[in-house]
Image (cartoon, rainbow, N blue to C red):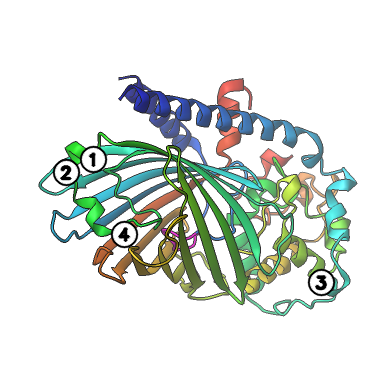
């Protein structure tokens, strides 16, 4: 019985320690390279998409429902890291930059499918292919982020993400 | 007493996090035994409760259950902690053990077949009935021992799995090969699990909905033992076939149910499993904020 309790306690402490260390470790990582939207290396992965993947055409590019469906999927899957308006968040870079908006739809689809595992972006192939294309359609529909002058109160426009508040990303 | 204090602290922490954590719609497979190659998103915590009702020939039916805390430590490492228990009708309700499980993704990119390495430590009593895997020569008759006797026999076990999983045109196919070693002098034991599943719709709806077909996933799994090092094969082993259904709600909850059927005389004739889980976004960040005291 003593062994039983000792084993339990050791495992419990190990688990708690791991949980906390990984949480702190993740925080540290976030505060360095991944979080900086202006760091070009963040977008290097999209350049690694092979030719075949780049040339894939988005079958849902003209689907009238794709942007709406992609917006909801983005809110569920992506906003946590990339921000509600896709302008960059706690962990992920902005998707409303030239590197993403000018990229081929196939390249974005490739990154979604493969993730950037070493830098913390999970593999999203668990979303069926049509849903990944819906996400690509939505992301491409966002365009570039407005510049500071465009975001002045006179030119302000409603956020593109799922939630209404944009303050946490500004 | 120390154990219960520790548990209380964990539950207080989890409740605190629940109270101001964001949740997200999960995209979980419906499997109870088999694993696919998808790990928990980094920093997210999934809290899961699962139950198994099992029939028992020559003895009393039972209801076993486990609580699972699944945490995405990184995009390539998921760690899980389990607490197991069971009620044998007409006998007693007891705590049966703990499990600490880790899954690692060795390859950075997605391939047609994706391997995952699985390492688990189990500290459990012989009264454990969660049937989370089929291994060795485990058969229905092993579960006849009264709880008061079975709980005295404690085992420490390491379990290794190679998970090979593929997703093709919306279908997920997975094959798990298991090797388990009781850390005493018992021989290596082996087992397997196979699974296939698919969402009922592949495209997402343009409106938020709980009953949309893409939120439902149907599948089937088969699992059982493969004997041990000295007697490898199917003789004196139990095997199960179980259709499984999952419902991923937009609120972040996932519900699962799976009726399982024994495929030979060594197996329980019927197992009914069900489970509920909820995913908490950014749990890791919340915990570090709690300890660091900054936003």
In terms of depth relative to the viewer, which is nearer, A50 or B280? A50
For residue B146, the mark is: 2
Give SS at disc 2.
loop
Are the residues under marks 2 and 3 on the same chain? no
Q: Main secondary structure of the magenta part?
A: loop
Label 3 and label 1: CA atoms lie apart by: 56 Å
Q: State the image coordinates of residue A137 (x, y, percent, origin top left).
A: 72, 69
Tell whether position B33 is magenta: yes
Q: Is residue B211 visible?
A: no
- Mark 2 Cα shell of 10 Å, populated few (<14), some (14-19), many (≥20): some
Q: Chain of mark 1?
A: B
Indicate left or right for B252 with B282 as reference. Answer: left
Report which quarter residue B167 is drawn in.
bottom right
The part of the chain drawn in magenta is B27-34
Q: Chain of mark 4?
A: B
In terms of depth relative to the viewer, which is nearer, B78 or A157? B78
Residue under circle 1? B150
Check contact, mark 2 vs mark 1: CB within 8 A: yes
Image vertical order of residue A121 relative to residue B287, above or below = below
- Mark 1 Cα shell of 10 Å, populated few (<14), some (14-19), many (≥20): some
Give SS at disc 4.
strand
Image vertical order of residue B1 relative to residue B189, above or below = above
Report which quarter residue B236 is drawn in.
bottom left
Q: Select label 1 or label 4 by which is in front.
A: 1
Indicate left or right for B193 with B153 as reference. Answer: right
Q: Residue at x 81, y 66 (%)?
A: A107
For residue B273, the mark is: 4
Check contact, mark 3 vs mark 4: CB within 8 A: no
Q: Is residue A134 visible?
A: yes
């Amino acid at each position: 019985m003593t062994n039983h309790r000792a084993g339990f306690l050791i495992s419990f402490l190990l688990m708690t320690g791991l949980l906390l260390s990984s949480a702190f470790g993740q925080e540290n990582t976030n505060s360095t390279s991944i979080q900086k939207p202006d760091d070009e290396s963040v977008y290097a992965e999209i350049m690694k998409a092979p030719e075949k993947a780049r040339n894939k055409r988005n079958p849902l590019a003209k689907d009238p429902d794709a942007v709406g469906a992609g917006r909801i999927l983005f809110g569920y899957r992506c906003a946590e890291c990339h921000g509600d308006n896709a302008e960059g968040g706690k962990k992920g870079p902005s998707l409303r930059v030239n590197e993403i908006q000018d990229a081929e739809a196939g390249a974005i689809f490739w990154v979604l499918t493969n993730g950037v595992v070493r830098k913390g972006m999970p593999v999203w192939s668990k979303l069926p292919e049509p849903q990944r294309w819906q996400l690509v359609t939505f992301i491409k529909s966002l365009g570039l982020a407005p510049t500071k002058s465009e975001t002045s109160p006179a030119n302000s426009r409603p956020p593109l993400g799922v939630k209404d508040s944009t303050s946490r990303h500004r | 007493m120390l154990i219960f204090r520790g548990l209380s602290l964990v539950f207080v922490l989890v409740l605190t996090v629940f109270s101001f954590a964001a949740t997200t719609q999960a995209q979980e497979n419906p499997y109870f035994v088999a694993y696919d190659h998808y790990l928990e998103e980094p920093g997210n915590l999934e809290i899961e409760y699962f139950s198994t009702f099992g029939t028992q020939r020559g003895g009393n039916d039972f209801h076993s259950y486990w609580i699972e805390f699944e945490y995405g430590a990184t995009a390539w490492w998921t760690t899980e902690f389990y607490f197991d228990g069971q009620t044998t009708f007409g006998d007693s309700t007891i705590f049966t053990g703990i499990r600490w499980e880790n899954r690692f993704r060795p390859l950075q990119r997605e391939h047609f077949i994706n391997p995952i390495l699985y390492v688990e430590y189990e500290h459990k009593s012989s009264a454990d009935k969660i049937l989370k895997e089929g291994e060795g020569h485990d058969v229905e008759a092993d579960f006849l021992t009264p709880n008061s006797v079975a709980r005295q026999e404690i085992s420490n076990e390491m379990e290794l799995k190679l998970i090979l999983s593929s997703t093709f045109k919306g279908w997920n196919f997975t094959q798990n090969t298991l090797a388990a070693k009781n850390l005493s002098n018992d021989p290596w034991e082996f087992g397997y699990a196979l699974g296939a599943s698919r969402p009922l719709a592949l495209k997402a709806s343009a409106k938020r909905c709980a009953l949309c077909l893409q939120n439902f996933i149907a599948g089937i799994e088969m699992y059982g033992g493969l004997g041990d090092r000295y007697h490898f094969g199917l003789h004196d082993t139990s095997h199960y076939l179980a259709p499984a259904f999952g419902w991923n709600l937009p609120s972040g909850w996932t519900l699962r149910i799976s009726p399982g059927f024994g495929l030979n005389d060594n197996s329980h004739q019927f197992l009914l499993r069900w489970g509920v889980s909820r995913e908490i976004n950014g749990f890791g960040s919340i915990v570090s904020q709690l300890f660091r005291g900054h936003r």
